[in-house]
Image (cartoon, grey):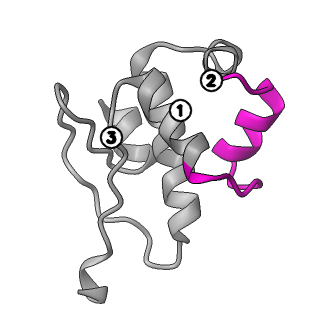
Amino acid sequence: MELISYLCGVIIKPTTMIPQKKENADMSVEMRLARRIKAIRILRGYKQKELADLCGMSSQTLSNIECGKSDFRIGTLKTIEEVLQCTLILIPNEDLI
């Protein structure tokens, strides 16, 4: 749990809830999403190559997504969500509300 909280404070639906940790206000939405994908992959017990294969992408593409080096389409996000059986929720920083 500490690793997941450290990585970004993830909410996973429908079964597992992990408390939110306030994120760095300077971190981009894309980078926060990238960290969430990696955190959930680790939580679910997938190696990067395994998840990439299940999503129909190269492990390099998934690595780039998880590092925030690659833009990706909503369809790619949906595929990752389906394989990980979760919904990635981006909650804006409190100061932006």
Q: Is residue 88 above or below residue 28?
A: above
As helix, strand or loop, the secondary structure at mark 1 comes to helix
Q: Residue 12, labelled with which disc? A: none
Q: In this view, does 90 lie above or below 40?
A: below
Q: In this view, does 65 lie above or below 80?
A: below
C-beta proximity under 8 Å, tags 2 and 1 = yes
Residue at figure coordinates x 76%, y 44% from the top left? 64
Give amino acid for label 2.
Cys
Left or right, residue 13 beside residue 34? left
Give amino acid for label 3.
Thr
As helix, strand or loop, the secondary structure at mark 3 comes to loop
Q: Distance between the residues labelled 2 and 1?
A: 6 Å
Q: In this view, does 37 lie above or below 1?
A: below
Earlier-in-chain disc, 2 versus 1: 2
Q: Residue 55, labelled with which disc? A: 2
Q: Along the line of sight, which residue is nearer the eye, 30 or 95?
A: 30
Residue 87 in percent (x, y) is at 33, 40
Is 86 contained in the magenta span?
Answer: no
Residue picked out by circle 1: 79
Please state the extent of the stretch shown in magenta in the rendering. 56-74
Q: Nearer the viewer, mark 1 or mark 3?
A: 1
Is 73 contained in the magenta span?
Answer: yes
Give amino acid for label 1.
Thr
